[in-house]
Image (cartoon, rainbow, N blue to C red):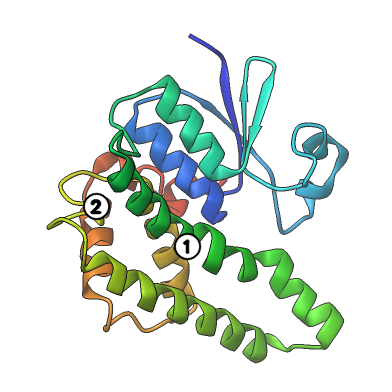
Amino acid sequence: MSDIVLHDYWRSSAAYRVRICLNLKRVRYTSVAVNLLEGAQRGDANRAINPQGLVPTLVVDDHALTQSLAIIDWLDATFPEPAMVSGDPLTRSGQLARALVVAADIHPIDNLRVLKRLEQQFGADQAARDDWYRHWVIEGLTALEAMAADTPEGPFLGGQAPDIADLCLVPQLYNARRFEVPLSDMPRLCAADAAMAALPEVAAAHPDRVRPR
């Protein structure tokens, strides 16, 4: 078995996705904390394995894997069960499309470095940054709710088992609740999130369970 190390931050949405995947696949790993609030992600040690200065990074023996969806893809190829993406091309396309609503459209413009840039470059105060955050989350999740209506009957986004879209959904709803984003118009997403939360492997990946003490 390879030595697997996850360079992680407890509240990072991208790292949270990878933790869920690792747990669902029952992959043993060691966690190394990278404190984003202290800027550790931009330090030499983290940039040596992740040139973007981000988390997560999954180090497997001497190989550093970056970008959460690419890491999940590697995990799926290396530890096939349970599969996070389908072998059927049409099903796979739908799964990836739903995942990318979060990973490509919502998360990148709402993450910590963007919110800080809004403050530093444009003078946005906390209220303005929170409004920015909520706007893009609501727009993206509203679309995802509509997309989920066309998927197989739940409890998860893609049907009877979690897939890569569920891995992205759980951290996004965790953050949405932190920012008091209204979710009453998103019953399908909330039901999938609740189904995920009921799984012990998912519960073990929750930020409150992995936060450094």
Residue annotated with mark 2: 158
Give the image location of residue 38, x and y in percent: 77, 55
Q: Is residue 48 left or right of residue 164?
A: right
Residue 98's quadrant in the figure? bottom left
At x 41% / y 44%, what residue is drawn? 205
Which amino acid type corresponds to the residue marked 1 in the rendered image?
A: Val
At x 28% / y 77%, what residue is drawn? 186
Task: State which tag comes first along the sequence, 2 or 1.
Answer: 1
Name the one closer to the observer, 158 or 32: 158
Indicate the secondary structure of the residue bearing disc 1: helix
Q: CA distance from mark 2 to mark 1?
A: 15 Å
Q: Is residue 165 left or right of residue 49?
A: left
Give the image location of residue 64, x and y in percent: 68, 27
Whether label 2 touches label 1, CB < 8 Å: no
Question: What numbered label is drawn on residue 102?
Answer: 1
Residue farthest toward the top in the current orientation of the protein: 1
The local crowd at label 2, few if under 14, some if 14 to 19, many if 20 or more residues have their Cα within 10 Å, is many
Indicate the secondary structure of the residue bearing disc 2: loop
At x 24% / y 60%, what residue is drawn? 192
Query: Where is 131 relative to 10, above or below?
Result: below
At x 49% / y 78%, what residue is drawn? 179
Query: Where is 87 relative to 205, above or below?
Result: above
Give the image location of residue 12, x and y in percent: 57, 54
Q: Is residue 204 left or right of residue 132?
A: left
Which amino acid type corresponds to the residue marked 2 in the rendered image?
A: Gly
Residue farthest toward the front in the current orientation of the protein: 89
Q: Is residue 45 left or right of residue 59?
A: right
